[in-house]
Amino acid sequence: MNTNLLKKAFISAIGTVIYAMMFAWFMNNAQGWFGIQPNWLVMALLLILFIISACITGALVLLRPILLYIEGQKNEAVRLFGYTVGMLAVIAVLVGVALALSNSRNDSGVFCTQDAKLCSNGSYVGRTGPNCEFVCPEE
């Protein structure tokens, strides 16, 4: 097993994971930053961002193996690609297990309806807690 190939695969996999985390963070916060309401331009922008994202992750995962293949190092190219995808799969499984464990500890299994109550101080509150009660702020 070539440790140089494993090191390159690890760097590509970590780069891809870091990019995915940054992109997910951006998408999670974009509506709050820009106040964007869904319409056809927003959908077009999301599609363009998806295409750019596919290009970036494709380059992170495929560029080095393609260059090796072009240089005639076909076996190394295929192994590097396999190692990178394998490391991404292991990272995905680890993240999935971590999410499952954190959800099992924090999830009470209670789902409340999404209605609101007008409190005497003029604020609105939603249902909360294990009994789905309205809790108005103290006045």
Image (cartoon, rainbow, N blue to C red):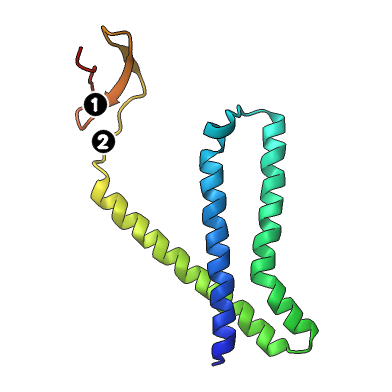
**Residue found 69% across the figure and 78% down from its top:** 65
Q: Quadrant of residue 113?
A: top left
**Residue found 68% across the figure and 83% down from its top:** 77
Residue type at mark 2? Answer: Val
Label 1 environment density (alpha carbons within 10 Å; few <14, some 14–19, many ≥20): some
Percent across and percent down for residue 126 are: 32, 22
Identify the image quadrant of the C terminus: top left
Q: Nearer the viewer, residue 134 or 119?
A: 119
Question: Height in image: 90 above or below 49?
Answer: below
Q: Are marks 2 and 1 in contact (CB under 8 Å)?
A: yes
Question: Height in image: 117 above or below 91?
Answer: above
Percent across and percent down for residue 17 are: 53, 62
Residue type at mark 1? Answer: Cys
**Residue found 58% across the figure and 64% down from its top:** 16
Percent across and percent down for residue 111 are: 30, 33
Q: CA distance from mark 2 to mark 1?
A: 8 Å
Say which residue label 2 marks.
110
Is 87 on the left or on the right of 72, as rendered? left
The kind of secondary structure element at disc 2 is loop
Say which residue label 1 marks.
132
Is 19 on the left or on the right of 134, as rendered? right
